[in-house]
Image (cartoon, rainbow, N blue to C red):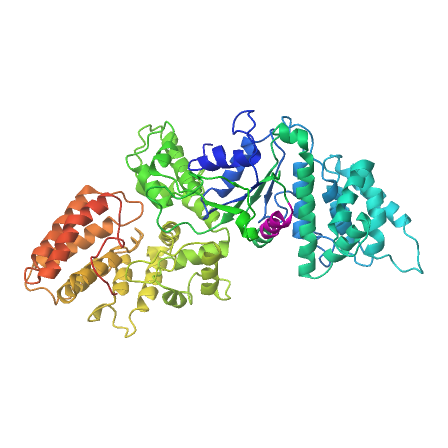
Amino acid sequence: MTLYGRSAVLNAVVPSLVGLEPNGPKRLRIPDGTPLLLVCGGGRGSGKSALLKALSDQYAHRVPQAYADLDADHFGQPGLAAPADGEAPRNASRTSDLLFYLMDGLSQKPSEFGGKLSFPRLVQGLLAITSWEPVRPSEIPAARQRLGELQRASQPDQQARNERVLGWIDEVAGALPAVGGIPPGVEELVRPLLRIVATELLGPRANKDGLKWWEARRVGRPGDGLAQLTELAMTFRGDAEDREHAERHLLAALLADVADHYGRLNTMNRVPRPLLLLDNAHTPTGAAFLDELARVWHEEAAGKRALRPAVVATVLSQDPPVPDPEDTAPSTRSAPGAFWRADRPAAPAGWLAHLPLAPLTLDEVKQMFGEDRPAPRTAQVIHRLSAGRAGTAHALVQAARLRMRLLHDAAGTFDPVDLLDLPADPEPGTTVNERILATLLPGQVARRRLTYYSPALDNEAVHRLAAGYPPDDPGGVPVLEAEAELRDGYWGRHPWPGTGGPFVGDPTLRALLLHRLTALTQATPLGEQWKHVHLRLRSFYDPQGRGTAADRPDVRFLHHSLALGEEEFVVHALHRRFAEQDAPDWLAALNLVCAAPRPPQVLPPPPEFTAVCRACAADNDPVHRAVRLLVSALWAQSPPLVAPQQDLISTIRLQLLTLAMAQSSAPAAQKVLYRAHEEWPTLLGHWRQAPHLPTYGESAP
């Protein structure tokens, strides 16, 4: 699969770090200095994991590499988690388990790579911390599991590994002197464990060289390499700060083992460096590991040229609220500058190079269709709805292409309005909207809550809604938990003009959730859930309980009224506001009201609104008629799946001109409305929608 907007990382940055061109055998010059740690950030659905997959495929069979999903229990590899029964073992941690896993991946020799990486220092360090206390039941199973991991490269048969581990444990136990029946402590186990296991795994020479390195580390009190490794094991069992200190020694061992592979000859021959791919490094495990790695990167002495693994991590981060129209900011698409440092930064953070994942351009979305020809403006609808997020755009494009093939319709004449209801797979069942939402909001409870909360314009209204929705909610503090889900998912808040909301502030996520709510309520009798959700939300803005009889309903009340299909009532209220408000405030009110979602088709029309409009000067008042036509056209143009419709835009232009003409006695208001008459049609034609049309002044709800 072609990745768009990632060319800088795939073709320049990572090849520089690895030392090998993207698609050929050419080895690249090794720059002076030390490579940076590359951190690529983006929101959910932006294609973070796809980028790492592309890098893995690009260098498969060419350089040693290891991939770890830092949000998965097993880092993407079964068999590495701590034993579930009993207390958590003190001879293992998430970081030490991750190092077992990374070492195993890097130990696999690619067919096109010269020499096999070995890790004597890291093996010795992991062996030391894996030593167990017989009086702690959880530690022996943990030790067995991790001792087995050390043999994965040399012994693929799991049964044989298990038998060898049991032999090691028996041999270590037999080497310990019995002292009054008291079980041996960790400090007594480390030496025989290393002597028996490390020698067999590494060979005498590598074991000896590794011990010399540990002797120079001075982990604790002076002593030989075995003494330092004993200190390492004891430190690992200390408090959180001690354990982090021990883990940094293990990371230093990893870097030293990699550097040791690149002697003078390999450096002269420009042998490429190994590749570490760390997915979801924003998680607690990932953030802690990346922080420790950067600290070790900073603290370990390096000469003129430090040969270290190429590290690429992805993190969940907030997408920029407004994409860079000139596309000049550094990103995964364009990243000028070097990604090696010849100087030493003042702090570990100086070794991190952050690159945001570039949002896709419209041309790139069009290219995703390949030879298929979708209906006109389908690509534009996908680009706007996805906000350029690669994963979301890809899912929508694939669903559209699947529909075109099923219809045997090369012209792709299906309506883009139906895009989110298309099946995600050839077999009908899951819609593409459900598939995307399951990716963006993996938790079912959070997804259901946010579906019902999505129409809300502010947090306070959601608290009122949460008393009854969603049905059968598990309870707790649902609104605060929903807010935490949005915050922890780095979903941005893009407030609407004149408000602090909506509650779900990301336009893409809100559009998908509202579509899901429409689909759910479409299945209820007469759309009752949609009706009751909006009635409850709008009641928050009607503290006197006067409903449609209020003298001057709140604009947010009108927004939810329009979502209920009460168009004539809304027109009456906006006509009266037109007579009382200044023009910028009135345009702001019109914007907010017409951004209301369309009700489901099963919702019956509201009772006929028969009240007399108090703003009308006569029957068939031209201003009232203009407001009605303007509201109807702007509301119809506002759904996120609707492309610009020229007939609607022409109606909007004409009615704004009519309203400007009606303000002949108010030159300032006339000027504002005439400006809207001139500019709004152009903006609407360029895919702008309510509530983001300009109002030409300060606004208040």
Q: Is 484 positioned to the left or the right of 598 in the image?
A: right
Q: Is residue 179 above or below residue 251?
A: below
| Res 109 seen here | no
* 222 and 96: which is toward the camera: 222
Q: Quadrant of the C terminus?
A: bottom left
Q: Residue 111: horizontal and vertical position, in percent?
A: 64, 26
Q: Residue at x 41, y 45 (%)?
A: 433
Which residue is depicted at the point 10% across and 58% down? 670
Task: Check residue 75 for magenta coloring.
Answer: no
Q: Is residue 297 magenta?
A: yes
- From the viewer's perspective, is 393 left or right of 238? left
Q: Nearer the viewer, residue 628 or 254?
A: 254
In the rendered structure, which segment of residues is drawn in magenta? Answer: 289-301
Residue 558 visible in the shown view? yes
x and y percentages locating residue 551 in the rendered image: 19, 71
Could you tell whether 303 is left or right of 231 in the image?
left
414 horizontally vs 320: left or right: left
- The quadrant where residue 552 appears: bottom left
The front one of 388 and 347 is: 347
Expressed as whole percent of the image width and height from the top left, the position of residue 218 reads 75, 52
Residue drawn where x is 29% and y is 61% of the image: 560
Q: How many marks?
A: 0
Check the image and name the residue furthest to the bottom. Answer: 544
Tell me if residue 551 comes above or below residue 436 in the rendering.
below
Q: Percent x, y for residue 163?
A: 82, 40
